[in-house]
Amino acid sequence: MATPYTPIQSSALSIAALAAMLTLGQSAQANEALAQKNNCLGCHAVATKLVGPAYKEVAAKYAGQVDAQARVMESIRNGSVGKWGELPMPPHSKISDADLKKLATWVLSAK
Ligand code: HEC
């Protein structure tokens, strides 16, 4: 009896799923643009080590740590040395807290 409605329900569901995927995709792209704008990608890539560690390695290292976002924001703002190797990351003191938060969230979600 209910079967005539099933196709309508499932297409409504997939539209919602598509909308969610688009939103996620857009914010990931916006954060990548932010990383580009701040020259992060001159030293980092998501999947490979360049001058600095690959973002997916950073995400793996901090996975499950409650204060991960705050610690990564501090590292980006104040610079970092000795956590990943000999080379230091220079400080980025001009990036706003809101942007630091977006960058940290983006890095920590890298796969
Ligand atoms: C001049 C090259 C350079 C630039 C530019 C740079 N990084 Fe780094 N980054 C590094 C190096 C080298 C390390 C490893 C530092 C260490 O061993 O402690 C690092 C480490 C990191 C870490 C790991 C920190 C931790 O606490 O484990 C994150 C996250 C990060 N960078 C994000 C960024 C973001 C976001 C930007 C742009 C705003 C950026 N980096 C720009 C070279 C760079």
Image (cartoon, grey):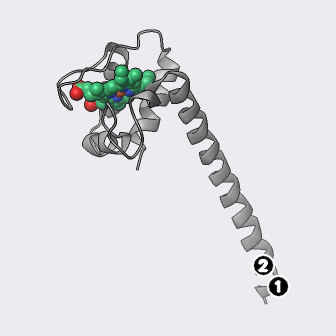
Q: Amino acid at mark 1?
A: Pro
Kindly indicate the quadrant of the structure image that contains residue 93: top left
**Is the C-beta separation of discs 1 and 2 under 8 Å?**
yes
Residue indicated by mark 2: 7
Quadrant of res 3? bottom right
Residue depicted at x 76% and y 65%: 12
On the question of residue 70 being in view, the answer is: no
**Residue 47 visible from this viewpoint:** yes
Q: Relative to 105, does residue 57 appear above or below in the rendering?
A: below
- The location of residue 96, given as percent across then percent down, is 50, 14
Q: Is mark 2 within 8 Å of ligand 1?
A: no
Viewer-side residue, 91 vs 13: 91
Q: Find the residue positioned furthest to the bottom.
A: 1
Task: Find the distance from the CA under tag 1 to the CA under tag 2.
Answer: 7 Å
Residue 27 placement (x, y as % from top left): 60, 39
- Numbered disc in front, either 1 or 2: 2
Residue found at x 39% / y 47% = 47
